[in-house]
Amino acid sequence: MAFHGLTAGIICDQLQTVPPRDLASWRQLRRGWSRALKSQPPSTVVEIAIGVLSTGPWGRLTAYELIACHPTAATALTSRAVRHLGRGLADWGTVDAFACYVAGPAWREGRLATREIHRWLRSPDRWRRRAAVVSTVALNVRARGGRGDVARTLEVCRRAVADRDEMVIKALSWALRSLIQWDRKAVSGFLKEYDDTVASRVKREVRTKLRTGRKSE
């Protein structure tokens, strides 16, 4: 699919021919691509994102930010597209980008079923489980379009509370801290209910946030 001379192939060629030196140089490129895509239909942006996903070390982050930085691209996400964009997750940074920019918004807007998020929580893959928990951030953080969703967030937290993988523990803390602005009482109640199960790191960070408004003192 082509428009104004830009295609997924051209983006891939630019990423491969002259790879960005660092995050700053990559982001300069991505901003230029986002400007070119701004007026294009959301389905076009999702198609292009899928097309660049596997292109070198910058392809995955490019795909996620092209969607996140387009005014309406998230409205064209389908469960199939989300699954495609989530294949091969294997590191902290891209997992969180996927969850915050793709899976979380799609879930929030009803384009990804809650049962899919719950299925990820049962995965033997730590990154898939982390993605499920971090997806709640898009439900609750205003800067990411969150409008507050106590029920869905706490259900995910309940299903993840006994997970002792470090990546999931950190995600659980983030999820609960993000919910505080919407329902402090519910978060405090969760900690009390699962006091014998929830990881000490989660209790420490969330209670500090409840008390001081910060992650740590």
Image (cartoon, grey):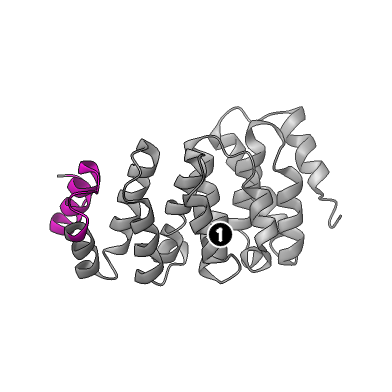
In the rendered structure, the answer to whether residue 179 lies left or right of residue 156 reads: left
Amino acid on which disc 1 is placed? Glu
Q: Position of residue 182 (x, y in %)?
A: 29, 70
| Disc 1 target residue | 116
Q: Quadrant of the C terminus?
A: top left
Q: Give the residue drawn at x 82%, y 43%.
A: 9
Q: Give the residue drawn at x 14%, y 55%.
A: 212
Question: Residue 51 versus residue 133: which sits nearer the camera?
Answer: 133
Image mark count: 1
In the rendered structure, the answer to whether residue 71 lies left or right of residue 205 reads: right
Mark 1: which secondary structure? Answer: helix
Question: Residue 75 versus residue 4: which sits nearer the camera?
Answer: 75
Q: Position of residue 102 (x, y in %)?
A: 57, 56
In the rendered structure, the answer to whether residue 75 lies left or right of residue 52 reads: left
Q: Position of residue 16 (x, y in %)?
A: 75, 30
Q: Is residue 79 above or below residue 55?
A: below
Q: Position of residue 37 (x, y in %)?
A: 72, 58
Q: Quadrant of residue 142?
A: bottom left
Q: Quadrant of the N terminus?
A: bottom right
Q: Is residue 24 rendered magenta in the image?
A: no
Residue range (magenta): 193-216
In the rendered structure, the answer to whether residue 153 lies left or right of residue 41 reads: left
